[in-house]
Image (cartoon, grey):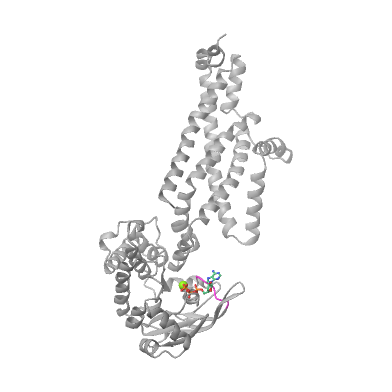
Amino acid sequence: MTQPIIQMKGVVKSFGCFQALHGVDLSVTEGEIVVIIGPSGSGKSTLIRCINQLEEHNGGDIVVDGIAVGKGRRRAAQAEVGMVFQSFNLFPHMTVLRNVALGPVRVRNLSWAEAETRAKRLLARVGLEDHIAKYPGQLSGGQQQRVGIARALAMEPKVLLFDEPTSALDPEMVGEVLDVMQQLAKTGVTMVVVTHEMGFARKVADRVVFMDGGRIVEEGRPDEIFNAPRDPRLRSFLQAVLSH
Amino acid sequence: MSIFDTFLNWKVFVQTLPLLLSGLTTTLTLGVTAIILGFVGGLALALVRLYASPPFRQLSIAYIDVFRSIPILVLLVVIYYALPFVGLRLSPFGAAASALSLVSAAYSAEIFRAGIEAVPKGQFEAAYALGLSPWRLMGDVVLPQALKIVIPPITSNSINVMKDTALASVVAMPDLLKQATQAQALAANPTPLISAAFIYILILLPLVRLVGVFEKRLAGRGR
Ligand SMILES: Nc1ncnc2c1ncn2[C@@H]1O[C@H](COP(=O)(O)OP(=O)(O)OP(=O)(O)O)[C@@H](O)[C@H]1O
Ligand SMILES: [Mg+2]
């Protein structure tokens, strides 16, 4: 039986008096690719940021790889969960190679030599072997995001979270990042992806989760979600995003 | 008597130059000591102010506010003339270095805080997402970026510290200004004072220019 690697039960998150998540249940099994879609402000980012505790949830339980995360248990989750950000968030004062090698050295206690070997292998995998000595500011957006993916992978995380990884990119660079993610999906990595790229969701996802108003409204296989949406909110959302 | 004989008397200048140079050494030693202590203390204060638990945070804020409000001269006089009454007797150098460092640390703390706060939130998040410890996050990710941001204001503050070393002459510290006034009395001629003024300018003007260059470079990079 495949164990759930992420288990969220009744997760509640408020910002002051505004409630962003109204009791969300979600479990993700090992190797599963889950794509989260939904309108702006529906709580997609908040949900995945609770998984690695960039946001502390106010209620409910989150178990990652058998460890309950929450107050005081922040780092337990963070080393096992990788994250790729919309705005890359690479460290601008470090070379590409060092960006990728830093986590393994500081958190996994690898030597710099071991970590750099690993970093080079991962950077080659995302097609950036020729850019390892550059600084992030010298790369295109698409290249920076591929570094971001390599940086997350270098920690050998149990789960990879993506928060709109292509939304900040020029259209011609979206493809190269989605290609890398698609390759990654085939390797058995567990991925939770927030995206507006419906093509990616349809092609790569094992399960699509639709959120609205801080709740999961509907979830299912991509063909169910895209071809036979049941909830009227999902239908109008799909109509809006697929009509252009 | 011509103006040259009075204010720019070559003979007096040559005679008193050794005295002035010994004063300069004292001034530089004092200034550099206070700058380094103020830098380290300011960084520590800023980190406590930003990240420590509430009581320590309040203490840090109180320290920063008090030492930014007190005139250095008053602090210096208190340290040198009042503390002996409670058994704490500092040398002129010790008193001056303490006063300058205590105040410089308060100003530096506010500069560091602004620098740390100017590092984008995404940098902190990326570091947390990697699982870096708070110390690693600061040392590897945040401080290198913050230090770059604070180079111009920290340099400005260092210039102020250097200038404020002249206050040490009131506690009989043989610094540049003190030696210049002494030399003036001995030579019965104000040339040493004029020379001292030029020496201050000679040392600080390049630093002032440097701040301008730093600021221009930072602005040019648009970050
Ligand atoms: N730090 C915060 N403080 C206050 N409110 C917040 C904060 N972060 C998010 N919110 C609110 O919580 C709600 C959910 O935000 P979230 O970012 O999770 O939405 P999203 O689905 O990711 O939207 P988008 O597609 O625009 O990224 C929004 O209404 C947002 O305004
Ligand atoms: Mg979002």
Please tell me which residue is depicted at 39% across the width and 66% down the height of the picture.
A168
Pick the residue in front: A82 or A73: A82
Residue B50 horizontal/vertical position (percent): 57, 58
What secondary structure predominates along the stretch shown in magenta? Answer: loop
Residue B27, given in percent of the width and then of the height, sits at 55, 31
Please state which of residues B211 and B95 is positioned toward the viewer in this rendering.
B211
The residue drawn where x is 40% and y is 59% is A91
Taking the spot 40% from the left edge, 65% from the top edge, the residue there is A88
Q: Furthest-front residue in view?
A: A243
Residue stretch rendered in magenta on the structure: A54-58
The answer to whether residue A56 is magenta is yes
Residue in the foreground of this view, choosing between A34 and A105: A34
Q: Is residue B183 left or right of residue A171?
A: right
Specify whether residue B33 is in view.
yes
Going 64% across and 45% down the picture, which residue do you hit? B68
Q: How many marks?
A: 0
Q: Is residue A5 visible?
A: no
Residue A150 placement (x, y as % from top left): 34, 68
Q: Quadrant of residue A37?
A: bottom left
Q: Is residue A36 above or below residue A153?
A: below
Which quadrant holds residue B166?
Answer: top right
Q: Quadrant of the C terminus of chain A?
A: bottom left
Residue B189 within the segment the image draws in magenta:
no
Image quarter where the N terminus of chain A lies is: bottom left
Point out the residue furthest to the top here. B1
The quadrant holding residue B48 is bottom right
Q: Is residue B53 above or below residue B44?
A: below
In-image side of B65 versus B214 (left or right): right
